[in-house]
Amino acid sequence: MKILITGATGFVGSNLFKTLEARNHHVVGTTRWGPEGESSNLINVGEISEKTDWSAVLQGCDTVVHTAGRAHILDDRAEDKLAEFRRVNCAATLKLAHDAQKAGVKHFIFISSIGVNGNKTEGKPFNELSTPQPTSDYAISKLEAEQALQSQFANSTMSITIIRPALICGENAPGNIRRLLKIVESGLPLPFKGLKNKRGMVSLDNVVSFIIACIENELAKNELFVLADKDAPSTEEIVKSFSLGMNKPSRVIWFPSSILGVLLALVGKKSLYEQLYGSLEIDASKSTRLLNWQAPVTIFETMERTAKYYSKGNK
């Protein structure tokens, strides 16, 4: 089986690429910046858009795993941020899918985001039947891509699989994971003592394992999956796991969350408060029920290993 992975030098794509090669699949990958190392199977396609010509890299491919996209940008200077997310995450995705169909690809796997469902839950976990409620430009663009793929290829010879992973934790994790690791490493006291929220996360190893299950199992075709590890740690448990991996004492203190919520809202950081103090629970049981897939690692193992890797200078 020949598999194309877009974003093959990224956080998820690079790990998926290596694992599939180890399983003796014929894998090719694309990257924005050009081939890295000595691999001749990495192809530079530049910045992707609705004008990207994918025909050459798609020749002979049976499956496409689309991990490339425009993610959350801390200092986003785009004049129209939503338009930029749509250009890359929606328009470029559809161009790739149409080129893939023309090239005879049989299975297109789109890596979306749990943000499509929303940024918080209140007692009822998200699942595949939950009504989408995206709150960020990034999540809106991912939902629009999902909807377009499902409608435009509904009667196609190319099957569509959509995966919405929770926050992914693993070595070299970007974004919120890296920011929290930095804060824990600083040794500052953190106001999370006694917090009983639940934050759905997923281990990188489990994401890679599940994508491979979707590639190799026919039952995954034309299905939507939310993906998270079984355990949903509290913010206090996350800090303690990172501290344990760094071999540092965890410095968590009690502070009235209601007061902190007001203070963060006053400085325009309400979303940060929801990420740290709110819950985001995910029922990913469909992955086990339909595909008989089992996660190879736990989120607690992954958090400790990630923090240990980070503390050794891998920042």
Image: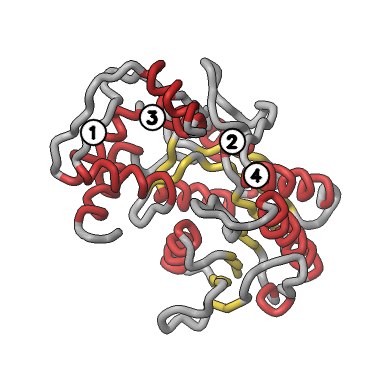
Between disc 3 and disc 1, whose residue precedes? 3
Give the alpha-carbon distance from disc 3 to disc 4, as whole Å.
28 Å
| Amino acid on which disc 1 is placed | Lys
Give the alpha-carbon distance from disc 2 to disc 3, as whole Å.
20 Å
Between disc 4 and disc 2, whose residue precedes? 4
| Amino acid on which disc 3 is placed | Asp
Indicate the secondary structure of the residue bearing disc 3: loop
> How many residues crowd mark 2 within 10 Å: few (<14), some (14–19), many (20+)?
few
Indicate the secondary structure of the residue bearing disc 1: helix
- Which residue in the structure is indicated by mark 4? 137
In this rendering, the answer to whether 19 lies above or below 169 is: below
Q: Give the residue displayed 67% in from the left and 65% down from the top.
A: 62
Between disc 2 and disc 3, whose residue precedes? 3
Foreground mark, 2 or 1, reads 1
| Amino acid on which disc 2 is placed | Leu
In this rendering, position of residue 18 left or right of residue 184 = right
Between disc 2 and disc 1, whose residue precedes? 1
Disc ID at residue 240: 1
Foreground mark, 3 or 1, reads 1
**Placement of the C terminus among the 4 image quadrants:** bottom left
| Pointers 4 and 2 in contact (C-beta within 8 Å) | no
Task: Pick whichever, 281 or 208, lies toward us.
Answer: 281
Give the alpha-carbon distance from disc 4 to disc 2, as whole Å.
31 Å
How many dots with numbers?
4
| Pointers 3 and 1 in contact (C-beta within 8 Å) | no
From where the camera sits, is residue 1 visible? no
| Pointers 3 and 4 in contact (C-beta within 8 Å) | no
Between disc 1 and disc 4, whose residue precedes? 4
Q: Quadrant of residue 32?
A: bottom right
Foreground mark, 4 or 2, reads 4
